[in-house]
Amino acid sequence: MNAHYCFAVSSFNPSPVIIAHDKIPQSIKAAANFSQIPSWVSLKSTPSSLQTQENINKAQIESIHLISLSKQGKLKEAREFLKQMEDAGISVSPRSYKCLFEACGKIKSLMDGRLFHEQMQRTVKNPPEFLENSVLKMYCECGSLADARKVFDEMRERNLVSWNTIISAYAENGVFDQGFCMFSNMLELETKPNGSTYIGFLRSLLNPSGLEIGKQIHSHAIRSGLGSNASVNTAISNMYVKCGWLEGAELVFEKMSEKNAVAWTGIMVGYTQAERQMDALALFAKMVNEGVELDEYVFSIVLKACAGLEELNFGRQIHGHIVKLGLESEVSVGTPLVDFYVKRSNLESATKAFEWISEPNDVSWSALITGYCQMGEFEEALKTFESLRTRSVDINSFTYTSIFQACSALADFNSGAQAHADAIKSSLVAYQHGESAMITMYSRCGRLDYATRVFESIDDPDAVAWTAIIAGYAYQGNAPEALKLFRRMQDCGVRPNAVTFIAVLTACSHSGLVIEGRQYLESMSSNYGVATTIDHYDCMVDIYSRAGFLQEALELIRSMPFSPDAMSWKCLLGGCWTYRNLEIGELAAENLFQLDPEDTAGYILMFNLYASFGKWKEAANVRKMMAERNLRKELSCSWITVKGKVHRFIVGDKHHPQTEEIYSKLEALNDSVIKEETGLLTEEDVSNSLPERKEQLLVHSERLALAFGLISTPSSAPVVVFKNLRACKDCHDFGKQVSLITGREIVVRDSFRFHHFKLGECSCKDYW
């Protein structure tokens, strides 16, 4: 026989133990409840005068107890009990050993399996065939192919189950050459393969590299007379899908005379992977029309196909079908529903679908929390997480990664650190992605020391982790350290990706490194093999604009190999406001309003630019455009954490319990600072030349948070304030002067970066 084929089979599952209850005395039946051994049973040697029947009864009872321990997974207790039985001279039945081997295989306890096998070899002469197969299967399930092969070679008799088990183990572990050899040996010994032989091998082929082997197996199965076997054909069709040959899978599927749900869903998976969602839905409709029994896996696939379509209606129809079948409370169906609505950005429906699940599992909770994060509902994500922690439901690593992202967005250091500690205790920090999310979280919370410690603890950081730490330093405005890390990343042989260069260019932007930024942009493709995108060019536009090279920024927008987007013009407009260039500013605003007519920040920038030139009519027209389009400036919000509690403030806020003390402190600070204040125009306010607007400046949200921090924290501690919008020039100057007057370090994180105020100076050097 040609040793040219390689196959694997699924493991043999012997029938469960059957106890002949009619042969066991009633007293023994009552005691055999698998909870405890009757008090009259002794494991000590009994006098020879006792009746043989009593010894038989005792062996039966103790074997039943041994079986109970194995089925409960109590292998330590089973070992101890087994030793006592051996010391007492009580024999262990082959079926008891079989249950012990099954338990070892189930939990992959190789050590226990070897101990039980050694004892079986000492006490059982000529073990029956089914018991040797149980030992073989146990070693395969525990991943010890060497032990399994030794058992196989020493077996007195090998049946088809023996061959299928060892061949399947080799195939599942990717040792195809050994699998081929075993298959050839089986044929030479005239043991005819069955469907399980082929199915096991087919299931081990998971990617395009296995396609040719799969075709050979298909051909051999046909020659073996299994060409019409429904199970084999289903496995062949699914194998072609996994190996990327969808046309072959369709051909096999169409020729099948009997198609079960597995065959149908296999083709649906192929359509979904090939982004042929409409074909997947059409196949589902055909399944329903032909009366094929639907299982939960069918719904998870069809809902995934619906998520890839723009219209929500298809998914709602599937949801209706699920309700008709009464399956909406099943976690295996409800969870894909939650995931579908999350992907379609419909949080309300996702929440309702979650509430219908009778017993949501960790995947259900994770899907909902991920949905909240994706929709920007970070506080709701944290509330849901706190609710999850009070329940007896496992938490998976994906949930913790989402929580790190939520804490990053909220700059919630306390919750993030607590989640970090919990994840470490449970060993649920997802490798690379979870660690990278933690780096970002600590960076956004202003704790670069923690972010660096997490990064340095990673044995082999990938591009995502390197990018996270580089971005952290860039966000702090520390370009030298960010670029140093970028060079170190290359020295470690890690290839930067497109996002890495966003972080590098951002570092250049926040530090005025125009020449360096241009060099990095020009070398991306040639030196690093990373294709540039509009986002990289927007970063360069921002670099030019922040540095005052407005004409160069405009020329780059006009000459870059991409059509400029809203961000291109917004970056330029921001530079025009900073350097008071009305001509280019009007051009940038016109293009910005065409591409994104609902960007309120653009209107505010243009309004302030007109106001700075005294062009009130034009400024009024900008305000009129906002009113006509029903646009309002985003509400500024600042927050500070004191003693683990978050305190939030908006402009003119008077809802805080310590409002009187806050305003008193603020008034004292204003009296000390007011003489030093100069430019009152801000990019987030209208006209500060108006008295009422000046009053609003004095109670900006970040000033209220700063005043509260000064009266609520020790004089030696820095005051750390977070803000959802970009810091205005007036409040930026205020922060510098307060740091000089009080001698306190003040840290403000706005939507762009961190500002560290010390003794009247800011880390950004007034460049942000």
Image (cartoon, helix red, strand yellow):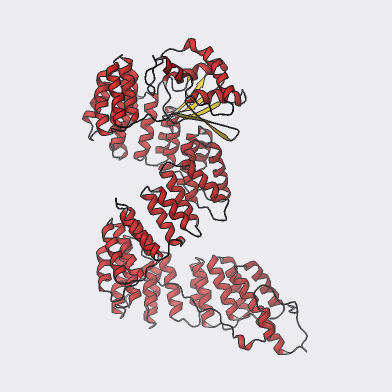
Quarter of the image containing the C terminus? Answer: top left
> Residue 4: in sight, yes or no?
no
Quarter of the image containing the N terminus? Answer: bottom left
Q: Which quadrant of the view contains residue 420?
A: top right
273 displayed left or right of 713: left
Numbered disc total: 0
Q: Which quadrant of the view contains residue 290?
A: bottom left
> Residue 23: in sight, yes or no?
yes
Q: Tell me the residue at 26%/58% (across/down).
A: 278
Q: Nearer the viewer, residue 689 or 16?
A: 689
Q: Tell me the residue at 46%/57% (across/down).
A: 356
Q: Tell me the residue at 41%/49% (across/down).
A: 348
What percent of the width, then of the height, locates residue 622? Answer: 29, 24
What percent of the width, then of the height, locates residue 641? Answer: 55, 32
What percent of the width, then of the height, locates residue 238? Answer: 33, 66
Above or below 221: residue 685 = above
Q: Nearer the viewer, residue 2 or 423?
A: 423
